[in-house]
Image (spheres, rainbow, N blue to C red):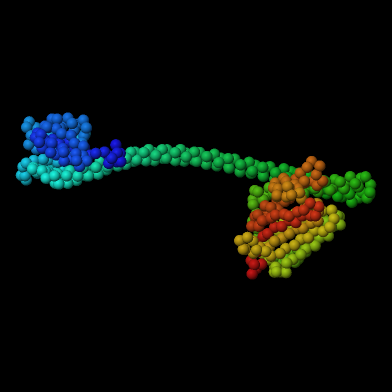
Amino acid sequence: MNTSQINSLKPAILIVDDTLQNIQLMTDMLSKNGYSVTAAPDGPTALMIAGNEPPDLILLDIRMPDMDGYEVCTRLKSDAKTHNIPIVFLSALDDLQDKIKGFSVGGADYITKPFQDEEVLARVNSAISLRRMQRQLEEQNILLEKEIVERRKAEEALKKVNDELEIRVRERTEELLKAKNAAEAASRAKTAFLGNISHEFRTPLNPIIGMADVLLGSSKPGSDEHQYLKCISVSGRQLLGIVENLIELSRIEAEGIQPQIEPVQLMPFLRSAATNLSYNAKPKGLKVRYEIDSAIPDIIDSDSDLLLSILDRLGNNAVKFTEKGEIILSVRKVSEVDGSPALQWAVKDTGAGIPADRLKHIFEDFTQADSSPSRRYSGMGLGLTTVRRIVSHLGGRIWAESYEGKGSTFYFTLPFHGRGSE
């Protein structure tokens, strides 16, 4: 029975008295004041009624034949079913020892005969209120105990789930670690293979190219022999370029890059880079020029060898895909997203351009702007991959802008070091 049900019912009172007149008087008075009253003329009857339908309160006369009120109270308090029922003793005696004995056997209060209605109602109301509060507390304790049990079950279930999750995470971590180790081992094996096979290719290629150039120099221009030797030389150099890219890429993956930052005179450096590129651009009639932002100091701090390697690769790539026009090398001072100063380098051409759907993939391994079987330009798509990795090792970033039929511009930024940032 819950608290609302308890409060909605009439409080039940059991009157135990061997005097019928007393029972009648108290029954009338209590019934008029909203109580449900049951009566018992002796102790055994009271024990039977209370055991079957425990009341909210018992008014118990002390002086009764065969079984007095003290014994009835003692039995009621020894029974778990009736133990908590409050008992108010009724007696014509007002002796202190009787009251003490009544309280000692479990009585809650004491009313002396003859009764005064106001006193009886006040003591009954007080006892009923205390009983209701007691029952509410008992009910709340039961609910609390149930909640504690359910919470413990939930905690045990959660602990079980956490234990299982930890096991699964640990197993998954071990699987990922094994997969990572396997992937790294495969990558090292691939790098070693590419490095070894590249060296094996380069060993016979150098004498082939050298002998072809010697014979080409002694052959008659325009003759079939001259054309054959020229084809051997050009094809050999193309193959050697592919091999060099493979070797460089393998070295970067295996050893990484340790930049050697040193003072670089910008004007002579960029002039030299443009001059080197002009030799390859001359057969196509392409012009090569350079531009320097006036805000940049004459001397910058950088790794000149790596920087030259980047410009050479991007410049030669521009020459490869440009049939007419010019190639421009430029550098200017910019601020990165985080506000740090940087040098932005650019290699611009007037070539065929790169399709938009291929532009975002051109820095990936073995990727070309034209991947069709009938592509015009040869190569394995490693040049830009190598450039991307060099730029990354130097702490920069690289990207490209291109329009088909109008040309491409490759940008890369490098940190503005040392005196260059003063």
Give the number of marks: 0
* Residue 285 percent coordinates (x, y): 86, 57
Q: Is residue 148 visible?
A: yes
Near-viewer residue (76 or 333): 76
Residue at point 70% right, 54% down? 399
* Residue 357 percent coordinates (x, y): 73, 47
Q: Quadrant of the C terminus?
A: bottom right
Near-viewer residue (157 or 272): 157
* Residue 179 percent coordinates (x, y): 58, 40
In the rendered structure, the answer to whether residue 222 lies left or right of residue 191 reads right
Residue at point 10% right, 34% down? 20
Residue at point 86% right, 50% down? 213
Q: Quadrant of residue 1?
A: top left
In the rendered structure, the answer to whether residue 66 lies left or right of residue 200 reads left
Q: Quadrant of residue 269?
A: bottom right
In the rendered structure, the answer to whether residue 35 lies left or right of residue 236 reads left
Residue at point 87% right, 48% down? 230
* Residue 184 percent coordinates (x, y): 61, 43
In the image, residue 394 above or below residue 47? below
Near-viewer residue (41 or 410): 41
Q: Is residue 417 visible?
A: no
In the rendered structure, the answer to whether residue 144 lies left or right of residue 184 reads left
Q: Quadrant of residue 347?
A: bottom right
